[in-house]
Amino acid sequence: MRPNTLRALHRDRRLIVNGWLSIGSSYVAELAAHQGYDSLTVDMQHGMVGFEACMGMFQAIATTGAIPMARPSENSPAEIMRLLDAGSYGIICPMISTAADAARLVESCRYPPVGRRSFGPARGLLYGGGDYFTAANGEILVFAMIETVAALDNLDSILATPGLDGIYVGPNDLAIEMGHGPANEHSEPTVIAAVERARKACVDRGLIAGIFCSNGPAAAQRAAQGFDLVTPGNDAALFRATLASAVTAARQR
Amino acid sequence: MRPNTLRALHRDRRLIVNGWLSIGSSYVAELAAHQGYDSLTVDMQHGMVGFEACMGMFQAIATTGAIPMARPSENSPAEIMRLLDAGSYGIICPMISTAADAARLVESCRYPPVGRRSFGPARGLLYGGGDYFTAANGEILVFAMIETVAALDNLDSILATPGLDGIYVGPNDLAIEMGHGPANEHSEPTVIAAVERARKACVDRGLIAGIFCSNGPAAAQRAAQGFDLVTPGNDAALFRATLASAVTAARQR
Amino acid sequence: MRPNTLRALHRDRRLIVNGWLSIGSSYVAELAAHQGYDSLTVDMQHGMVGFEACMGMFQAIATTGAIPMARPSENSPAEIMRLLDAGSYGIICPMISTAADAARLVESCRYPPVGRRSFGPARGLLYGGGDYFTAANGEILVFAMIETVAALDNLDSILATPGLDGIYVGPNDLAIEMGHGPANEHSEPTVIAAVERARKACVDRGLIAGIFCSNGPAAAQRAAQGFDLVTPGNDAALFRATLASAVTAARQR
Amino acid sequence: MRPNTLRALHRDRRLIVNGWLSIGSSYVAELAAHQGYDSLTVDMQHGMVGFEACMGMFQAIATTGAIPMARPSENSPAEIMRLLDAGSYGIICPMISTAADAARLVESCRYPPVGRRSFGPARGLLYGGGDYFTAANGEILVFAMIETVAALDNLDSILATPGLDGIYVGPNDLAIEMGHGPANEHSEPTVIAAVERARKACVDRGLIAGIFCSNGPAAAQRAAQGFDLVTPGNDAALFRATLASAVTAARQR
Amino acid sequence: MRPNTLRALHRDRRLIVNGWLSIGSSYVAELAAHQGYDSLTVDMQHGMVGFEACMGMFQAIATTGAIPMARPSENSPAEIMRLLDAGSYGIICPMISTAADAARLVESCRYPPVGRRSFGPARGLLYGGGDYFTAANGEILVFAMIETVAALDNLDSILATPGLDGIYVGPNDLAIEMGHGPANEHSEPTVIAAVERARKACVDRGLIAGIFCSNGPAAAQRAAQGFDLVTPGNDAALFRATLASAVTAARQR
Amino acid sequence: MRPNTLRALHRDRRLIVNGWLSIGSSYVAELAAHQGYDSLTVDMQHGMVGFEACMGMFQAIATTGAIPMARPSENSPAEIMRLLDAGSYGIICPMISTAADAARLVESCRYPPVGRRSFGPARGLLYGGGDYFTAANGEILVFAMIETVAALDNLDSILATPGLDGIYVGPNDLAIEMGHGPANEHSEPTVIAAVERARKACVDRGLIAGIFCSNGPAAAQRAAQGFDLVTPGNDAALFRATLASAVTAARQR
């Protein structure tokens, strides 16, 4: 089976730079895949992407060595299994707040006897290779999004879930639940402390600590703080910003 | 009929900033339409866009005040009429090298007795309004792309074509035909002189002089040279550049 | 944030005429949006529409002042949040039979601390505006579909749900559960009484009482009965009827 | 090969009622196909339809006994052959103004030695049957649109084109070229006379005389005048009218 | 209502040959529908198919007499109802392990008072006919997939579920849960015994016993064993095999 | 620039096995790309494929080492340039009957000063690499389809066209024009002689001689006759045959 190169990067203590795709276009995905990301995550929760567009985006990503991952819209076994069958090599699942949530997530991503994934890998077989069934449990990465106060309370039991590979912090939902508004990067001390606590607990267990960041420099800062996987902004926000700046520059005298 | 605001901008000697869409996605088009462009051109020649995606992009643009335009893949009456029926308020036609080319182009864009456009405005009627037939000839803008040596030789007769509203310089094809390679901005004196000659001849006749530029600052420079309409880079190139820079920044220590 | 004009219409005691879109086509949606509806609802339950087509339909609606709404396929937080992120300004949720159902529905539509909506408004940001997060809870409308006997039994507690803006009666499912068949308009006294009881309870609380009707005259009658929001037929049924009548007329001698 | 039932209808002097599809949706096409039309024409000239949507619409039509036809965007052999390969059983070609135009049209629709159609019937084979190659020349209908003054001048030579099955009058383009505006039905005596002259010349030769009409009653009138094939309005216009009328009715007090 | 011909085939003790569609393409579905299958099942669980592609595939199937069915991604009422509204005449539901699962499945497929299906048959009305509501409960087939050890344990109570029409054995998931790997056809005695036990219990009750097979000969063997409905391989696997064999043959010297 | 591996195969006198894609599906294209073909050609002439589906298919092919090519619908510069911009590494152009046709074809595929291709490689840049402009003329393969009697008459001048890389024989259109019907493989002596004459003239000049074959064994025979590139059947025909055979086998007792 095609190896999940993110595992080696993490083993070698090298930073994983993960792109974020919310635009439902295989051409956009291919444009992104050529820019040097280690992985690209298709966002089925907040992204404007349906299932078939997602599959096309996975195909586009697979024209390069970048690893395709997906964020499902919820912790739904049926949806997660479909994304894996379409060739996703990682799942970043929103709203994991308890160990039971995490166990359910892992079960969806692993074939028996470890989990309850149904067999029928479809496009995954093309991308992964003929030994998909025997090797998939060892290659596919499972991330629990930590973005609720409950998740912080249950951090230890979540992290103890067998088969979980890491966490992915969603700073905005976390901060909003803590009473703040969304922000590019949160400066509230309680949010900062919560994020750091999640990161440390994760890293201490040898799991992969990931986080969404608003842009490249913010991602570098998170990497410096000890995060293993960073997302330097999402496609739509970066696109908006660069177009707005091109228009402004054009109007400059 | 909804007025083509580009006409008023030109009349008032205000710069027209035109975006360039080569990604076949209505969401990308809507993201772009909110960034302050005066108009957005869907590229059916070099863009990765089919007819129905183009219509969806025109719908997305029509959620804002930006004016939708299109570049057809060639000087084809059938294709141009379809783009107009889908709601395009301007045509930027590639490879206009003779007065006959220009006349054929104008004929495709105007209803009789001025031209030979066939009646059936479809979505154009929704976007333009109930008086589309009587007003369309006066609102829709027709640009001839000047991008061959022959076009420069025939500049006067092209510009004299009744019903032509302006030119749009394609620096790369022009430079390539003159023996140079593609470039972000061309520094070869012969290319610079050719572009300036086209601009001046156009402006002297009171027509709209437009040009493709590689980015915002280059567009500002073209505006300073006296171009009336500038395109500060295309969507795919700007997107690639901003993602690459986010990845690089994320890896910075 | 762009105001939800339906709120003002209701405040001013003006009738809301809502269109119903079950055809997955952005062109059909745009055709409809120009016919004078106050709002248009994309039907993800019984309509032949997938998520990306729905987004395109919201874009088409947004070329006019009509307010885009959606009926999700079920009371699913993940699905509802995706529809809101795509720009829906209202949710008409099927099969709300208990106060718990209604509370879950409202929670999906409101950001904390009121609800549990996850942040990431995507296209909603383009349609709504930059202050989306702070204003969305006040603009987006939440309707509970009353279409079961249980819902009638629990009407008071459903209507008492904080954050619920109104109801939307589904006469067919209600009548079917009461032992009748589907009908254009139901003449069974028990159905008539049930519908009237739901309307009155809703209006008495100052909430918006909406209902599906089979055509324009039936909608006018519902308006006369005191409904605030009426849907004069769905797109497919109206389309079928007008085509059938055109064929019949053509064959008339 | 599946017989083209329009041939039998014409042979039996029965009216052919043809629907007109400008909305690129297979669901709309299927809704229409169930309303009693003898044939349905997908409009690739003024319709908002791309090639793949057209194929899906042909599939939808083929769920019923209605005959699928298409209007190409122009008299292009490549485009016409693609529509035939996708299963079209008739071509209504715009802008046939000379015998040479008509000959070129017929050649595109017939296999050698009659014409120059390239072999590769694809979906046509599924719809038509295994003997497609030997029988297609005898089943597929070819209509020349008469919609220019030149076409009227050349009527006899156009109608004399071997292999041409009929004409289809486009009243709007014809009237516009004659100096009038578009209209639902044209009352200008010169237009009326021109249409009648075309009809009579066609019918006198035993060919099928078809015409576009604005609605059902207008189609009945054309049938009464002796037209063999009538189109009682296009989908978008009928849809717009019925929705507008539903909205108006709903607002009636 | 159009009769579900599978019922008659079963009544007459004739084998039902069912095709399996995992490729999201209406053209592929139409190609398949012409090859002699009694029914075709669109796979929304492991197939690369979204909702709208599924509808297009149902349309393509409906150009022939083959019966359209679907496998939903899970036992979800909302998803199942959507598939039925799109015209599915049968549901093959994965992972039915208890009588409660089976009851929930049947409820989703039947209108009250038998079940809880919501009314709004959309395309189903076109395919089924005007009396859809009154007749659908009697035509639509409901199959429970037997693919877990728990299902075998609960076989009797599952089969006793009123309204269930049959079972469909998923040999791979069953074998995997029993500790074996996936295989074209399973030779492990425990798997063989389990499959036979399921078949016999089903047939003894007069219900339809179906099973997925890896190819045509394997399907014939299952038929010989007494299965009523067999699936001779899925589209993607058959397609892969025939292409690989064409390439190998081409390279033969 | 990514090398066109077909050039090396030909240089090394190794057979090129080329697949043929007429189904507009990126999943089908990816399934095919994994079966061992050296190249895959998307058929825009007789295939059921639109431009955007074609781009998705090129992306799917690019997940493997197979070389993507396309057959345009006609010898249209605009269409050919679009296919190249989308990443096609070869053009197999139908109906090349004269040296002028061949010259026009080559011009569409080569940048100046060799040809007249317009610059804007879009996705081609991603697939080919950053030096696309300088290297593309040397990598992209241009094939003239020989499928008319005129082409045979003009064979020498066609083959002498500078920049032409080879021919691709279309046996069916050729045989049909010679008065025969379509066939899997043609046994008529005149057709056999014509095909052999075309092959020999091509090979004698060191150009690549390609041909369409009905299946794998027929392709092997063509290879044995000295063809350099063979197509062992098209996707739809192979798919139909394998499904029909699976159904027949399933019904075998």
Image (spheres, coloured by chain):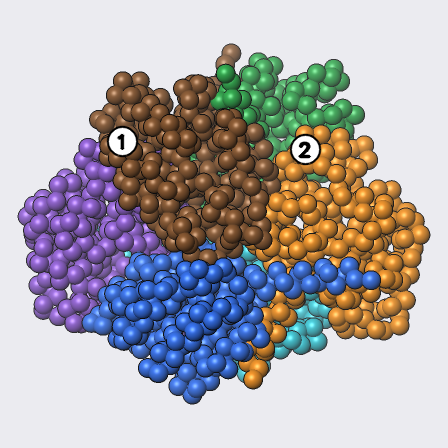
Chain colours: A purple, B cyan, C blue, D orange, E brown, F green
Please identify the quadrant where the N terminus of chain C is shown: bottom left
Are discs 1 and 2 both within one chain? no
Task: Estimate the x, y position of residue F139 in percent, counting from the top left.
Answer: 50, 35
Q: Residue at x 86, y 50 (%)?
A: D13
Q: Pointer 2 indicates a residue of which chain?
A: D
Q: Residue at x 21, y 41 (%)?
A: A107
Q: Residue at x 46, y 57 (%)?
A: E119
Q: CA distance from mark 1 to mark 2?
A: 46 Å
Task: Estimate the x, y position of residue C17 in percent, counting from the top left.
Answer: 50, 76
| Residue linked to disc 1 | E152
Query: How many C-alpha atoms fall within 10 Å of the one at disc 1: few (<14), some, or many (≥20)?
Result: some
Q: Pointer 1 indicates a residue of which chain?
A: E
Query: How many C-alpha atoms fall within 10 Å of the one at disc 2: few (<14), some, or many (≥20)?
Result: some
Tell me, yes or no, if residue D167 can be seen here: no
Task: Estimate the x, y position of residue B240 in percent, counting from the top left.
Answer: 37, 54
* Element marked by disc 2: loop
Task: Estimate the x, y position of residue A67 in percent, counting from the top left.
Answer: 29, 42
Discs 1, 2 touching: Cβ within 8 Å? no
Tell me, yes or no, if residue A114 can be seen here: yes
Between residue D60 and residue B233, name the one nearer to us: D60
| Residue linked to disc 2 | D129
Please identify the quadrant where the C terminus of chain C is shown: bottom right
Between residue E215 and residue A35, name the one nearer to us: E215
Q: Residue at x 81, y 47 (%)?
A: D9
| Farthest top residue in view | E253
Q: Is residue C214 left or right of residue E222?
A: right
Say which amino acid is labelled 1.
Leu
Q: Can you say whether D62 is above or below B16 in the image?
A: above
Say which amino acid is labelled 2.
Gly
